[in-house]
């Protein structure tokens, strides 16, 4: 219909200086839990999060922590 839907920006959250197999913050959509894992994406989990989702889960601090790399994707 000629309308563009604005989607909120999404971010990856990577802990600096840890082993590559556990550096990315992910959310398991099927079982509703957060965990750290590798850079691989899948269908039952996501490594790209909105700021609102991160803040609601208690991860709002990642945006101001020097040990965490947050990238907009």
Image (spheres, rainbow, N blue to C red):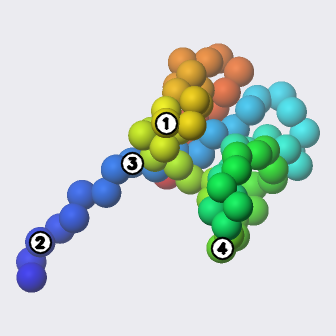
Per the image, the residue denoted by label 2 is: 3
Q: Residue furthest bottom?
A: 1
- Discs 4, 1 touching: Cβ within 8 Å: no
Write the residue at 53% across / 49% down.
49
Mark 1 or mark 2: name the one nearer the start of the chain: 2
Element at label 4 = loop
- Discs 1, 2 touching: Cβ within 8 Å: no
- Of circles 4 and 3, the one toward us is 4
Q: In which quarter of the image is the N terminus?
A: bottom left
- Of circles 4 and 1, the one toward us is 1
Tell me how far mark 4 sits from mark 1, CA to CA.
22 Å
Write the residue at 24% across / 58% down.
6
**Disc number for residue 9:** 3
Per the image, the residue denoted by label 1 is: 56
x and y percentages locating residue 41 in the rendered image: 69, 65
Per the image, the residue denoted by label 4 is: 43
User: Along the horizontal axis of the image, is 62 left or right of 45?
Assistant: left
- Of circles 3 and 1, the one toward us is 1
- Of circles 4 and 2, the one toward us is 4
x and y percentages locating residue 56 in the rendered image: 49, 36
Please tell me in which quadrant of the rendered image residue 5 appears. Answer: bottom left
- Of circles 1 and 2, the one toward us is 1
Mark 4 or mark 1: name the one nearer the start of the chain: 4
Write the residue at 78% across / 44% down.
36
Tell me how far mark 4 sits from mark 2, CA to CA.
28 Å
| Residue 61 visible | yes
Tell me how far mark 4 sits from mark 3, CA to CA.
20 Å
Tell me how far mark 2 sits from mark 3, CA to CA.
18 Å
Q: Residues within 10 Å of mark 3 (few under 14, many from 20)?
A: few
Element at label 1 = helix
Q: Residues within 10 Å of mark 2 (few under 14, many from 20)?
A: few
In the image, residue 47 above or below residue 23: below
């Amino acid at each position: 219909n000629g309308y563009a839907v604005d989607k909120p920006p999404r971010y990856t959250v990577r802990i600096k200086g840890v082993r590559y197999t556990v550096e990315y913050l992910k959310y398991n959509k099927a079982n509703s839990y957060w965990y750290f894992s590798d850079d691989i994406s899948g269908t039952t989990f996501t490594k790209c999060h909105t700021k609102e989702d991160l803040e609601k889960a208690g991860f709002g601090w990642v945006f101001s922590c020097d040990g965490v790399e947050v990238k907009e994707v």
